[in-house]
Amino acid sequence: MQRLYYDYNSAEPLPAEILEVRILGDRAAVLLDKTIFYPEGGGQDADRGSINGVPLLDVKESAGAAGPEILHLTAASENLKPGPATLILDSRRRRDFTVQHSAQHLLSGTILRLTGKHTVSMHLGAEFNTIDVDTPELPADTLIRVEDAAADAVEADAPLLIHLCPPEDLTQFPLRKVPPRGEEVIRVVEISGYDFSPCCGTHCKSTGQIGILRILGSEKYKGMTRVTFIAGRRVLAENRVLRQNGETISRLLKVPVAETGAGVLALLERSAAQERELKALQEAAAEQKAQALLAKTAVPLKTPAGAPVREGAITETYDSNFDDILRTGRAAQKKTTAILLLASKTENKFAAFCSGKEVDLRPLLKTAMERRGGKGGGGAGFFQGVFESFTALESFLCDVI
Ligand SMILES: [Zn+2]
């Protein structure tokens, strides 16, 4: 089986031969005489594309009975049977992963060169990539120096060279990481003058093809530092989104794009000050309403059976929203031990307050509320409920007063 994936990265169809199709339930594993599809490995995801028009779901290398084989996994299809086949590579996706992978080598090599810290593991994701660096911290200014040094390397357009050599010859390379064991030939990827790393992934021909490497952030991870980054067109796509957001904020706040951060901060501070002012005004209004409420005479409540009870209640119905009513009730409650029964005409809700320790509002109100279809609950000193209509709320009030 010929492995063409290191040299083949175009979207042009390539004729090949299907040697065998293994059916695995509703899936098929296709074996080819040659493949242009990179099998998952070295931290790089498998290629996508199609065989005879059937989309690839995954590509895996496995140890077959007669040596290593590459399984092309697809949905089971009548289009897949031994004989001639047409392979089509998702070249855009391949190019993206090739760029991300080369950028990862450049990033890990640059961090090692500038800080002496090694990359322990890496992950190339569909949206962003990460490396874990063996150090508890990488300060922000170091990450900027790393980004700039990587940009220098991109501008220098240094070639990426592939060396295939037996393990005993590896001493000639200052390898950044330990090579895999048990391989007859080790593939060393060199960013000339920058980095040497054993790797089986696909790579750009030179650093210029990476375009740009952008570090998105870093965080502590299991005693190490996880650095998140993107490269190439992903940076362009992200920049478009950021620019669009920046321009929206700039237009709305009437500040230049570069000053949107300070603009939002100022807006939040103004809004917090207004919030504090509003709260003070609401409390003052509640206090006034509470005074008016307390000037009213308390009348005895009726029990669920209709007989008057000892506790006196002050009742009022308001046009205002329920939050206002709750504020009024809380303010008035501090100055009386009478039951306060307050209703909102706009929201069909009521709230009852009582600071008298010997009173339990629940037995006084729950049954009457439920009889009129109300829903609610509470404790001994606070009880609230809501009704389908104002008529139902009014009937409830008549029942208890
Ligand atoms: Zn690699």
Image: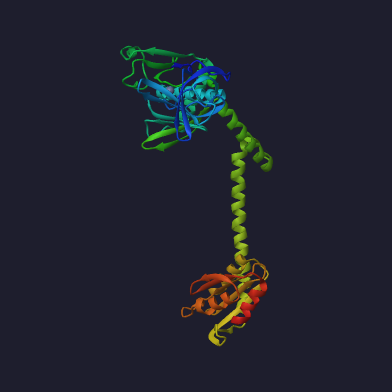
Q: Nearer the viewer, residue 355 or 177?
A: 177
- Note whether 248 is above or below 349 in the view shown: above
- Is residue 351 found left or right of 1 in the rendered image? right
- Is residue 2 found left or right of 180 in the rendered image? right
Please give the name of the residue rendered at 55% of the width and 82% of the height, measured from the top-left corner: 304
Q: Can residue 192 be seen from the camera position used here?
A: no
Identify the coloring: rainbow
Instruction: Name the quadrant of the C terminus.
Output: bottom right
- Note whether 16 is above or below 26 in the view shown: above
Counting from the top left corner in percent of width and height, residue 219 is at 44, 37
Q: Nearer the viewer, residue 181 or 229?
A: 181
Counting from the top left corner in percent of width and height, residue 329 is at 57, 71
- Is residue 57 found left or right of 171 in the rendered image? right
- Is residue 261 found left or right of 360 in the rendered image? right
Counting from the top left corner in percent of width and height, residue 151 is at 52, 22
- Note whether 207 is above or below 328 in the view shown: above
Q: Nearer the viewer, residue 104 or 263?
A: 104
Quarter, ligand 1: top left
Q: Nearer the viewer, residue 330 or 93?
A: 93
Instruction: Name the quadrant of the N terminus.
Output: top left
Q: Quadrant of residue 283?
A: bottom right
